[in-house]
Every structure is written in C-alpha cells, then in structure tokens.
Image (tube, rainbow, N blue to C red):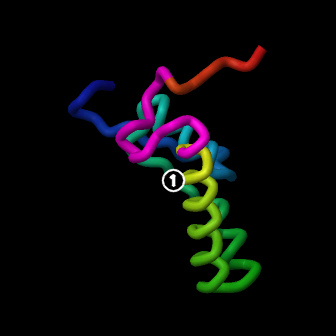
Amino acid sequence: MGPDYPVLLDSGVRRGSDIAIGLCLGADFVFCGRAMLYGAVAHGEQGVRRSISILGEELLTVMGQIGATRVADLRRELIVAAD
C-alpha cells in the first residue's frame, strides 16, 4: 500500500455516510454496486439513477455536517470513534 497503489473500498456500502467514511479512511474509490443493483431490480435504469442521486445527496449531507466542502476535504481526522 502506498501512493503508487490505489485503495478501493468495495463491501457493505449502503449509505452516503459509508462513502464518506471510506474516503476519510483513505480510499481512492468507493464502489456502490449493491445500491445500484437494488435500484435496477426495482425500477430499471431509472432506479439506478435514483440510487446514485440518493447516495450523492446523503454524501453531501454528511459532508455539510462535518464541514467538508469538497471530497478532497475528507480526511482521517474527521472520523470520531463512538463510545
């Protein structure tokens, strides 16, 4: 692992907050296949588009709550352990 190798997160991503956490922990990419699959099964292409929209809205909400205005602002220091 290091700057020469991308870090990919691909497991258990169901919400925009999961995407934010993955990016804060150093992931270069976060895959969201399950959400897209659910959207496709429910409503075809429109369902996939809606899934992307929901995840994007959730990510932006989380970013606003933690004071990040850009994806590049997501960093490890923003993660707080729950008691």
Residue 58 image point, x, y percent: 63, 55
| Crowdedness near tag 1: few (<14), some (14–19) or many (≥20) residues, C-alpha within 10 Å | some
Image-quadrant location for residue 65: top right
Image-quadrant location for residue 80: top right
> Given the image, on which type of amino acid does mark 1 rest?
Phe
Front-lying residue, 72 or 52: 72
Q: Please give left or right for residue 42 compared with residue 7 in the image.
A: right
Residue at the image position 72 percent from the left and 78 percent from the top:
41
Residue 40 image point, x, y percent: 66, 78
Describe the element under mark 1 as helix, strand or loop: loop
Front-lying residue, 67 or 15: 67
**With respect to residue 39, does 34 lie above or below?**
above
Residue 79 image point, x, y percent: 57, 25
Q: Please give left or right for residue 18 compared with residue 38 in the image.
A: left
The residues colored magenta run 64-77
**With respect to residue 73, does 71 lie above or below?**
below
Residue 51 image point, x, y percent: 64, 69
Q: Does the magenta stretch include residue 66?
A: yes
Q: Does the magenta stretch include residue 44?
A: no
**With respect to residue 35, does 75 lie above or below?**
above
* Image quadrant where one finds the C terminus: top right
Residue at the image position 21 percent from the left and 32 percent from the top:
4
Residue located beneath label 1 in the image? 31
Residue at the image position 48 percent from the left and 21 percent from the top:
77
Front-lying residue, 52 or 63: 63
* Image quadrant where one finds the N terminus: top left
Numbered disc total: 1
Residue at the image position 44 percent from the left and 36 percent from the top:
74
**With respect to residue 68, does 55 lie above or below?**
below
Q: Please give left or right for residue 83 compared with residue 37 in the image.
A: right
Seen from this angle, which residue lies furthest top?
A: 83
